[in-house]
Image (tube, rainbow, N blue to C red):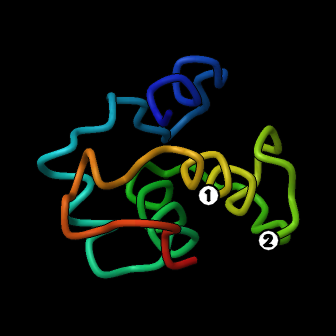
Amino acid sequence: MFDEFLSQRPLQYGEDQRPFQIEDDYDRHFSGNGVYAGVKSFLDSRGIRLAYGDPTDDDRADTICGLGNRLGSIDLSRIDPARSGSPNR
């Protein structure tokens, strides 16, 4: 999901568009955090600034909440078996 977002985003000065690394990025930004906090932390680490938006944002919105909602539609238990069901936002 993040790789698609990063690849479609025009490169801007100071942004790091390396692909999302499950082993590093998931543990660093998402493990133990809510989805929106994880999205914000990941984007901050790459120098990407987006509007926070609103938890009701459509999952196609390029906001922190929109990306979080897009991520929420992915089965996170495939990434981290300790997480099941709906992610903590």
Residue at 48%, 36% (x, y): give it. Answer: 2
Quarter of the view holding residue 3 = top left
Dot placed on the residue nearer the N-terminal end, 2 or 1:
2
Query: Is the residue under label 1 in contact with that under label 2 (CB below 8 Å)?
Result: yes
Q: Three-letter amino acid code at disc 1?
A: Gly
Callout 2 crowding tier (Cα within 10 Å): few <14, some 14–19, many ≥20: some
Residue at horizontal 38 percent and vertical 58 percent from the top: 45
Dot 1 alpha-carbon crowd within 10 angstroms: few under 14, some 14 to 19, many 20 or more? many
Secondary structure beneath label 1:
helix
The span from disc 2 to disc 1 (Cα, nearest Å) is 8 Å
Q: Amino acid at mark 2?
A: Pro
Give percent across and percent down for residue 78.
26, 45
Q: Return the x and y of residue 73 as percentages of the image width and height.
A: 59, 47
Residue projecting furthest to the front: 85
> What residue is pinned by disc 2?
55
Relative to 49, 76 lies left or right:
left
Q: Residue at x 32, y 37 (%)?
A: 20
Residue 60 in the figure: left or right of residue 44: right
Closer to the camera in the image, 77 or 15: 77
Which disc is residue 68 wearing? Answer: 1
Q: Quadrant of the C terminus?
A: bottom right
Residue at 52 percent of width and 68 percent of height:
86
Residue 53 in percent (x, y) is at 83, 66
Tell me if residue 5 comes above or below residue 85 in the rendering: above
From the top left corner, tell me how far across and down residue 74 is, in percent: 49, 44
